[in-house]
Amino acid sequence: MTDHPAADHPEIRAICLDCGHKVRYSPTLLACPVCQSQWLEAEYDYAAIGKRLPALTKQRPFDLWRYRELLPVYEPSPNLYLGEGGTPLIRAANLGMMLGCPNIFIKDERQGPTHSFKDRQAAVNVAALKEAGVIEVVLASTGNVSIAFSAFAARAGIKLWVFLTSLVPAEKMREIALYGTQVVKVTATYDQVKKVAAEFARQRGLYLERGTRSIPSVEAMKTIAFEIAEQLPQLLPEAPHNTPWLAPDWYFQSVSGGLGPLGVQKGFRELHQMGLIQRIPGIACIQADGCSPMVQAWKQGKDTAEPVVSPRTHITVLATGDPGRTYTLLFQRAKAAGKAIFESVSDEDTFRTMHLLAKLEGISVEPAAAVAFAGLIKLVRLGVIHPDEVIVVNCTGHTMPIEPTILGEGWTRDVVLPAAQPAEVLSAGETPVSAAQASSEQEGLLAALSRVTDDRFPRILIVDDTEDARRLIRRILQSQGNYAISEAANGRQAIELARKEIPDLIILDLMMPEVDGFAVLDALKAAPSTAPIPVIVVTAKALTAEEKKRLSGRIQSLMQKGEFMSDELLEEVQALIKS
Ligand SMILES: Cc1ncc(COP(=O)(O)O)c(C=O)c1O
Ligand SMILES: [Zn+2]
């Protein structure tokens, strides 16, 4: 990625899916300026890019950014790069032999930086958000999106709030917390959690990651299609085709909210439009029997899915009960492409498939990923998939358990709603939660949410003229503690903010143009309201004896930039704020 030539990125447009209005794209563009629709799609100059893409990609490393002309980021930052994309495409020879299908391939997304295909979504989003200057983000997820975003947000210095259902396994929650993300665990279904997170973001004016309505998220998933099309010709050298790249007959994926299939379908569509592949593959969306709203709608020929209010599956990663308009879009595009499958599988078959895949192919996956393979086995047995077809299955994820003892206490905030009925405790005979009941739970959740606020948290003012330095300190503080942070980019602003906000602590840089740290300190100590505020000086300057004397007795701590570890700064901050 570091080898990529500097961006010469053509303009990206967003087109409104409701009124067709076109506008210059920006990550903070949340709705169509004409009709207010939140459903926008990125559009590029396909004719021009299509001509250049095969040559451009030849010079670039095999990662997601090799398709940067087709991604909504103008200047990808090498500092955020974690090796996203570029996962292997592996022939499943043994599974293929068992099923009598010689051309089954596994797109091994377990090999991404946080071990799921959601790394792509996080990488592209965080790059786009950093470019747009967003510093705090809220999202709800069933686990893997939060893990992936946490890793990239850590690198970007973006504060992240994730809202999870209490059913997300503790190992995943711990991994998220380890990255320094604020974890809010809500006892409710995933659909309810999404609403709570959206309300939280709205109340606080924070950026909300909106999944299938977020342009960077959909665009990120396209790269799976691009990579498959580039990799397949090497694995099928005998296949006749007269385009540079090759599409399979089928793309299989386990589906929850439908972001993957929506993006992958768009990716193949774009390649087809640019003349790089000859056909658009069929998309096979596989859901868990206990939460399969898309499959039920598809089998009835409907373009709208009836929400599943109480998901009944152990595979909580796939527990989106209400796919909303995403299903309608998938339905319309499937009809247009003339080829699609929506099928569901039981939890039991899924677990059996996990064993099979590990034992036959040496690939250990989480249950959510195994759903796609269980679907493939079912459809081959039913004769829906033909033995001579070329099939790519997205092996969406595998999460390593994280050491349970390294986090200490208090790393989640729990929002428990007494009336809420988590999905898992519903047994077969019980009545599902009604819509009215769900809505009153919603109100209770929002009330409980008001406790998750940082109004009461200690206030810290960070003073540094370098933006990256401020970001780093902000990040260190937010990774472990609950602080309300403000920033000043110069001495004058620092004095003004300190007088206005009377923070509980100031972290002060010394070397700044015009009003330097010494002058700030003079001003603070001269006013009775600001004189008692404790100050930690963090400086890159080697201090002279005279300078040390100027600081002596007036500051609580002196830390040399580059020499202290993040936990030392934290300890200092915690000690000063307690006393
Ligand atoms: C491992 C895994 N597989 C599949 C999915 C389904 O993804 P989507 O429906 O958003 O494309 C998810 C979603 O979080 C996942 O984590
Ligand atoms: Zn519009």
Image (cartoon, helix red, strand yellow):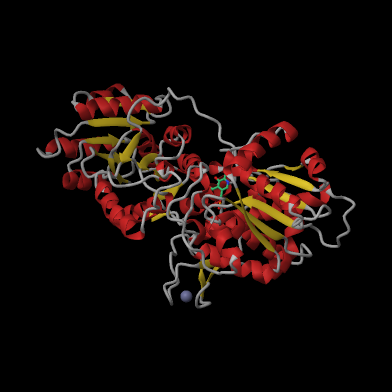
Give me the residue at 26% from left, 51% from top: 444
Seen from the viewer's position, the closer of residues 71 and 184 is 184
Judge left or right: residue 38 versus residue 510: right
Tell me, yes or no, if residue 215 can be seen here: yes
When the figure is inspected, residue 251 is found, relative to residue 117, above or below; the finding is: below
Residue 339, image x, y percentages = 70, 65
Residue 474 against residue 128 in the figure, above or below: above
400 and 556: which is toward the camera: 400
| In the foreground, 98 or 532 | 98
Image coordinates of residue 408 in percent, x first then y, are 36, 25
Farthest residue, direction front: 429
Q: Quick check: 28 above or below 87?
A: below
Is 232 positioned to the left or the right of 73 in the image? right
Give the residue displayed 47% in from the left and 41% down from the top. 150
In the image, residue 544 above or below residue 169: above
Left or right, residue 239 beside residue 327: right
Question: Is there any visible trace of residue 7 in the rendered image?
Answer: no
Q: x and y percent of residue 214 in the render?
A: 49, 59
Identify the image quadrant of residue 558: top left
Residue at 46 percent across and 46 percent down: it is 428
The quadrant where residue 470 appears: top left
* Image coordinates for residue 293, horizontal then vertical, percent: 52, 58
User: Which residue is outermost to the left?
Assistant: 528
- Identify the residue at horizontal 44%, vertical 54% (top origin): 209
